Amino acid sequence: MFKAILRAVIIGIAVIPLGSCDDMLPGPNQTNYSLFSDGSQRRIDKRLKHDNWGVPYYISKDIVFQLSAKIYRRSLNATQIQQLIPDSLAISDQKTLEIDVDKGKLYFAANNHIYSCSFSGTDMINLSRYEEGAFSSPALSDCRNYLTAIRSGSILSLNLLTGEWIELEGPTEVVYAVYVESTDEYFYFAKESNSSEMALWRFMPDTQASTMIMKLVCESGFNFSFSASPDRRYFALQSKDHNPDITYGENLLIYDRQNGLIQQIDNCFTYAFDNNSRRFYFSRQKFGLADLNYIDLQSGATTLVWDGYISQTSFSYSINRINLRADGLHMFISGYTGYRFNDYSKGSYLCTK
């Protein structure tokens, strides 16, 4: 545990010119689109993509964060980008940037510690500076008063109001965890003894007992995707297989902790919860096309957003990223485009680009 009083450190902001979009394409085969959440006004749009600046997080047209070895901030149409953290800090967990949109705060792991700062990069605080070991995977609780992190496969929980850390006894091999304040329980994803398995567990602090909820196996090795909805009601677990051209999941499981139901989606490429925890967007392979859908998390109804059709000779072959704006009304997607050629002397065939 450490004392609650922490000193904020104000940092300067570096301004770096952006290169051209074409210079930072993630690969020659990517196609990037923007569209509204109902599927309207879809168009090719390269303003938001996973490039040299890192994984994008779409807050608004004026605020986009990108996570790599540093954290950067820009607008959608910016020609410059701001470095939010000082050169003395290096991001040690490049898969996790926890964002509290309402409070305008970021939580991240750098130099193996957990830090927080404002959207402008000010009020930089090392939240784990009195603790030892390598921290990763910061995650806010449902009421945003606690923050969990992982250290050497164990769960640590920080009371953001008092500054006290506790380490949970029992769970091991954990890769990601969240605390649900409203019901006083933890949910965590952990590796099984077989490295090709991943499971979601529930941990009850009062009984110190863990219960397995669901588990998936990845035939090609340890390659999984997992997340929790912002309100911490829903949990998604996906096993993924690798292909030189596309990545898609054998199975995707969604767990609702309030009613205990588990829903399965097969042949899923990628997915995303919206920030309001009302919709779950996903793309799957159907009839040879990669479509885009969402599940209304209240009613359970599935709505088709885009069927993947582009033209008579082209179609969406895979979608590997969905970036929803924080208000849930707009998004960017990226993936591969397939082309159909009709040569009656040779028959029809497909290629991808």
Image (spheres, rainbow, N blue to C red):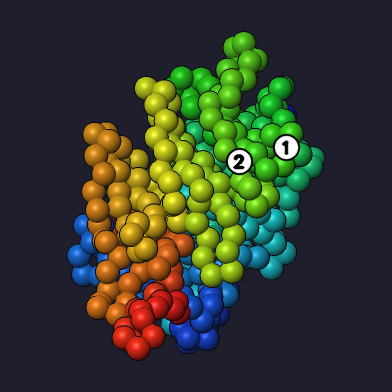
Please say whether residue 171 is visible from this viewpoint: yes
Quadrant that contains the C terminus: bottom left
Q: Residue at x 20, y 65 (%)?
A: 40
Tell me the element at label 2.
strand
Task: Left or right? Give the position of 150 relative to 29.
Answer: right
Point out residue 300 in the picture as x, y percentages from the top left corner: 27, 36
Q: Residue at x 35, y 88 (%)?
A: 345
- Quadrant housing residue 172: top right
Task: Left or right? Give the position of 152 relative to 250.
Answer: right
Q: For the residue marked with disc 2, what is the amino acid?
A: Val
According to the picture, the residue beneath numbered tag 2 turns out to be 217
**Residue extending furthest toward the right:** 132
Q: For the residue marked with disc 1, what is the amino acid?
A: Asn
Marks 1 and 2 close (CB-CB < 8 Å):
yes
Disc 1 to disc 2, how far (Cα)? 9 Å
**Residue extending furthest toward the top:** 207
According to the picture, the residue beneath numbered tag 1 turns out to be 194
